Image (cartoon, rainbow, N blue to C red):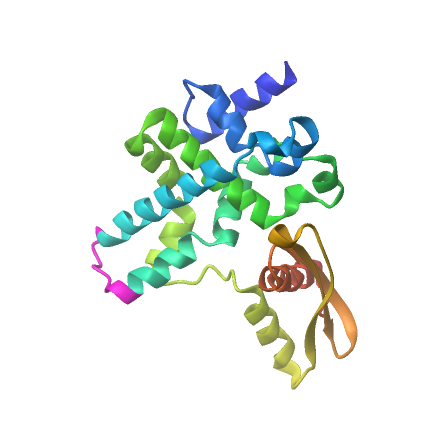
Amino acid sequence: MKDIQMIEKLQEKLGYKFKDISLLKLALTHKSYAYEYTGIQTKEYNERIEFLGDAILEHIISDELYNSKEQFAEGEMTKKRAAIVCEASLSQAMKRINGQEYIYLGKCEKITNGRKKDAIIADAFEAVLGAIYIDGGYDIARKVCLSLLKEEINIVLSGKSLNTDYKTKLQEILQVNGNVDIHYETISDFGPEHDKTFKVELTCNNKKIGEGIGKSKKQAEQQAAKNALENGKYD
């Protein structure tokens, strides 16, 4: 009953009611959950539908940029599209509707604060978009996508930065008071070879100021910088 109520609530926030609710549940199912409850070999998790959603997302944003009254050049459209569809941007849009709370996670991901990981949340955004596309078609998927990303799109079209490069932002803050020694070190990695997760520790003048986890070293470094900025540990 609780599961049904949660799904209904998410549909209200999305502004779309699914004809086939199993598509939305699939889009919200992380592989850690599928592995624990159904067996990973069933592929009943959101990576395939996320792949589709990623392609639909790129098409929607490309179309929006092409038809913008500013008529951006190709290189500028590429930069703006990358800024809009990046992990941090999608995660932020999903968080505005509290979407991270509806993702089905396995026990391990719950323990490691999976609901706070931008990578997982952004993947869920793309998967949900893919599910809407399958269930309702391109026009509806486009409408929902543009509604969810309205804030990010407006910021980028206005020429402003979304400030999603946490490493650069942190470095600029730290270097105001002169030269500092900023160092990112990968302290551990875990998971199978094809699907590793990395943990990075960030230090400034040999003092730990942040740590981050990501599916790549670069992603983990960005998360470490974000962690330092959010907690004010760089002061």
- Quarter location, residue 232: bottom right
Instruction: Name the spot of residue 150 as percent of width and height, x first.
Output: 39, 45
List the single residue furthest toward the right. 207
Q: Residue at horizontal 55%, vertical 42%? A: 95
Q: Residue 9's spot in the image, x, y percent?
A: 54, 23
Depth order, front residue of 26/132: 26
Residue 43 placement: quadrant: top right
Q: Count the labels in the image.
A: 0
Q: Residue furthest bottom?
A: 179
**What is the x, y in percent for residue 59?**
31, 46
Q: Residue at x 49, y 44 (%)?
A: 93
Q: Position of residue 144 (x, y in %)?
A: 38, 35
Q: Main secondary structure of the magenta part?
A: loop
Q: Is residue 188 left or right of residue 96?
A: right
- Give the residue drawn at x 43%, y 63%: 161
Res. 131 visible in picture:
yes
- 173 and 108: which one is in front? 108
Query: Taking 192 as reference, is 15 above or below it?
Result: above
Who's the residue at 52% across and 20% down the image? 8
Work out whether 18 lies above or below 95. above
104, above or below 115, in the image: above
Q: Quadrant of the N terminus?
A: top right
In the displayed structure, does residue 137 sit left or right of residue 168?
Answer: left
Magenta-drawn stretch contains 166: no
Q: Which residues are magenta?
A: 67-75
Residue 20 or residue 14, whichever sits in front: 20
Lateral position of residue 161 relative to residue 220, left or right? left
Specify the quadrant that holds the C terminus.
bottom right
Q: Is residue 103 visible?
A: no
